[in-house]
Image: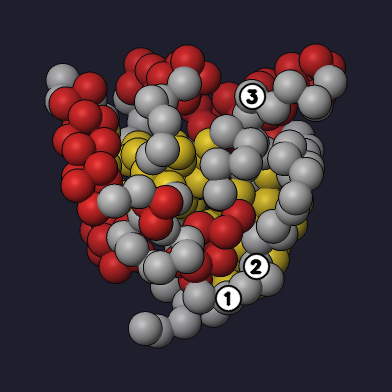
Amino acid sequence: METIQASFITGAVSPEQFPVHTLPEVAMIGRSNVGKSSLINRIVLQGNVARVSNTPGKTREINFFNTSMSFVLVDLPGYGYARVSKQHRAGFSVLIRQYLIERPNMALACVLVDSRHDPMESDLAMIEELEFAGRPYSVLLTKTDKLKPAQVKERTRQMRHLLEHCKHCVDVIATSSETGEGRSSVLGMIKRLCSQFNKPS
């Protein structure tokens, strides 16, 4: 499998700090401890691009990474972690929304959902927000190596059924940062969406 070269551009705590460029961006968003950083590292096949922490909710800024595939990978703060203060959660919420809803460079938002559980209210709220705003998104089911193949298939079917009437959902893909399941499908989807992306003038 080909390694995607990825390099850190900047970390932003306000929209004014978002980088200025014309490349399409692919954003990764999910609840804290859903396995977002591990999946990002598996997708690019570099173990140290996104920081993996044993303390959920540690990422408190939006991190931008340039890639050799001519798109920018965006790692957004995790949401829904109780041990982060209300003030920080409110700050995350505003910053995340400003990026996801208003960022013209965003070609795709990947909403990560733990495959071992039903999607939580915060996951559904994020999907609803993107759908209402007309922003293209996909759902990546994480940690599928913890389930039997039949369970993964059923969870994927359930999620697709849940989203079957959504106009802006691009796909539902089962993934594992441990085994690499779903990596080729995710990259294929990213390539397709980015090739259709109209660069800002």
Picture coordinates of residue 126, whole percent (x, y): 47, 23
- Return the disc, 3 or 1, that comes first in the chain's sequence: 1
Q: Secondary structure at mark 1?
A: loop
Picture coordinates of residue 80, whole percent (x, y): 64, 24
Q: Is residue 56 above or below residue 134?
A: below
Q: Is residue 89 above or below residue 174?
A: above
Residue at 56% x, 49% y is 36
Numbered circle sitting on residue 49: 2
Quarter-wise, where is residue 154 in the image? top left
Q: Amino acid at mark 3?
A: Gly
Q: Secondary structure at mark 3?
A: loop
Q: Is residue 150 above or below residue 114?
A: below
Quarter-wise, where is residue 66 in the image? bottom right
Q: Amino acid at mark 1?
A: Gln
Disc 3 target residue? 80
Q: Is there any visible trace of residue 169 in the rendered image?
A: yes
Residue at 72% x, 40% y is 56
Callout count: 3
Disc 1 target residue? 46
In front: 115, or 50?
115
Numbered circle sitting on residue 95: none
Give the side of residue 37 with respect to residue 191, left or right. Answer: right
Q: Gap between marks 3 and 1, in whole Å?
A: 27 Å
Give the side of residue 148 with respect to residue 122, left or right. Answer: left
Picture coordinates of residue 123, whole percent (x, y): 46, 25
Quadrant holding the N terminus:
bottom left
Residue at 73% x, 37% y is 57
* Disc 2 packing (10 Å; few <14; some 14–19; many ≥20): some
Is disc 1 in contact with disc 2, using a CB cutoff of under 8 Å? yes
Is disc 3 in contact with disc 1, using a CB cutoff of under 8 Å? no
